[in-house]
């Protein structure tokens, strides 16, 4: 079985641990712009490691150095070929535990130890590194296995949204065709007209028909509105994570509206920006459903702690969101924003939609994380602190422009609440 993916959507810490815990045999290749690492596993144990930055690879210190370097990478690609190892590798005498190497690597310095504790000791009762590893490994291994194999259910794109996306991808589609598809759903039609006449979208005369909405607002704006209104149906039903899903959805709406509002400042298309903002956290909603499925089917996961669930959601939602974007055939800019918006550096080569999505998510994080934890929002950052963010640097925003972006937040939060209700 071959596995492949991106570092930014599958943390290397978890990948190494998963390969050990499920006793995999084969070669893991990890590449980024600076180099290429190859780590050989036999029944989950590390036999040897090689790197473009090292000459020797057959001893423990070299393996530790290579794995330590790999764990620091935030971007790149990995692949795992599950095949018998070459005889010259099998004949090597040493066998190293990935868990022990990781623990040793992160315990070298106090700062690194803190990073490791944050990564794996997610329960508030965890007292040491070893216990933290054991406490969450069961559900984490199950989730990682499902994600690497693609063994999880992606919701079907609602019918009306699916049809209009298909129509708008055609070069010669007509506005009449678009309108006729929308009016087949009376609920969507009524909600569309309500929002088309809101102060957020309409600065002119009253819109009293779908065809008029398409003409006045534009096909892409209407398409995004219909998609947004359709996806609301995913956040329904009997669900142990229903309130968490609703909060994610409100945050997604606010992020979409903020991205649209700041599009002129960021010099991006406003509807593409809206769609990126809407989808960057949607993977969390799908992942909540996967976790619930495992908790209901496997007795050992029924009492999973809230902190463990939060760790899994925050670690893997980009992987799931990317799979959703691919299945729904959303624009490449959306997939790029989903998979890359959390791994920004000022030097990153990417479309402008990635830092737009990142900045929206960052600006809104304090508000929604406080709601999630039922706490008061933390004191807002000073505007000069915002200037240090990679997203601000990548977009080349001035302090005045940052001030403008922050000024959009109250209206976006208010209207997101209206759209979610």
Image (cartoon, rainbow, N blue to C red):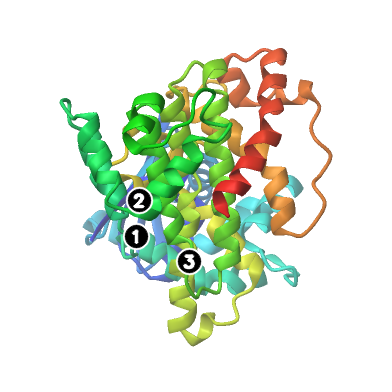
Question: On the image, numbered disc 3 is attached to which residue?
Answer: 236
Q: Position of 74 compared to 55: left or right?
A: right
* Residue found at x 53% / y 70%: 137
Mark 1 crowd level (few <14, some 14–19, many ≥20, 10 Å Cα): few
Q: Position of 37 compared to 361: left or right?
A: left
Label 2, secondary structure: give it.
helix
Question: On the image, numbered disc 2 is attached to which residue?
Answer: 324
Residue 255, x across and y down, in percent = 56, 39
Query: Which numbered circle lies on residue 385?
Result: none
Q: Are marks 3 and 1 in contact (CB under 8 Å)?
A: no
Circle 1 or circle 2, nearest the eye? 1
Residue 299, x across and y down, in percent = 50, 87
For the residue pair 119 and 406, the one nearer the viewer reads as 406
Q: Quadrant of residue 169?
A: top left
Q: Position of 154 compared to 275: left or right?
A: left
Sequence-first tag of 3 and 1: 1
């Amino acid at each position: 079985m071959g596995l492949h993916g991106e570092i930014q959507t599958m943390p290397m810490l978890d990948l190494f641990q998963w390969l050990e815990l499920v006793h995999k045999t084969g070669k893991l290749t990890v590449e980024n712009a600076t180099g290429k690492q190859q780590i050989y596993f036999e029944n989950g144990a590390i036999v040897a490691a090689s790197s473009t930055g090292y000459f020797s690879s057959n001893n423990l210190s070299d393996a530790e150095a290579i794995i330590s370097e790999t764990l620091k990478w935030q971007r790149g690609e990995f692949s795992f070929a599950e095949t018998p190892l070459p005889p010259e590798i099998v004949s090597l005498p040493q066998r190293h535990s990935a868990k022990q190497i990781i623990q040793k690597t992160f315990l070298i310095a106090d700062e690194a130890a803190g990073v490791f504790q944050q990564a794996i000791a997610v329960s508030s009762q965890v007292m040491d590194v070893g216990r933290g590893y054991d406490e969450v490994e069961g559900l984490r291994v199950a989730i990682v296995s499902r994600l690497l194999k693609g063994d999880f259910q992606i919701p079907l794109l609602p019918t009306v949204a699916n049809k209009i996306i298909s129509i708008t991808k055609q070069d010669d589609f007509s506005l009449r065709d678009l309108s006729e598809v929308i009016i087949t759903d009376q609920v969507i039609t009524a909600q569309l007209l309500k929002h088309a006449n809101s102060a957020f979208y309409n600065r002119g005369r009253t819109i009293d028909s779908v065809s008029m909405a398409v003409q006045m607002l534009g096909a892409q704006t209407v398409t995004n509105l219909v998609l947004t209104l359709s996806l609301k149906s995913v956040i329904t039903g009997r669900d142990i994570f229903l309130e968490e899903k609703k909060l994610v959805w409100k945050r997604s709406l606010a992020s979409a509206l903020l991205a649209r509002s700041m599009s002129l400042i960021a010099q991006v298309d406003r509807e593409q920006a809206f769609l990126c903002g809407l989808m960057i956290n949607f993977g969390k909603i799908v992942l909540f459903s996967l976790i619930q499925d495992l908790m209901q089917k496997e007795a050992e996961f029924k009492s999973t702690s809230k902190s463990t669930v939060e760790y899994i959601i925050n670690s893997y939602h980009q992987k799931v969101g990317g799979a959703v974007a691919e299945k729904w055939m959303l624009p490449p800019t959306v997939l790029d924003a989903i998979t890359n918006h959390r791994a920004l550096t000022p030097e990153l080569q990417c479309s402008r939609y990635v830092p737009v999505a990142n900045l929206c998510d960052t600006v809104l994080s304090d508000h929604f994380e406080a709601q999630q934890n039922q706490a008061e929002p933390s004191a807002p950052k000073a505007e000069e602190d915002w200037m240090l963010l990679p997203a601000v640097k990548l977009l080349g925003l001035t302090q005045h422009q940052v001030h403008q972006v922050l000024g959009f937040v109250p209206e976006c939060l208010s209207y997101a609440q209206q759209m979610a209700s």
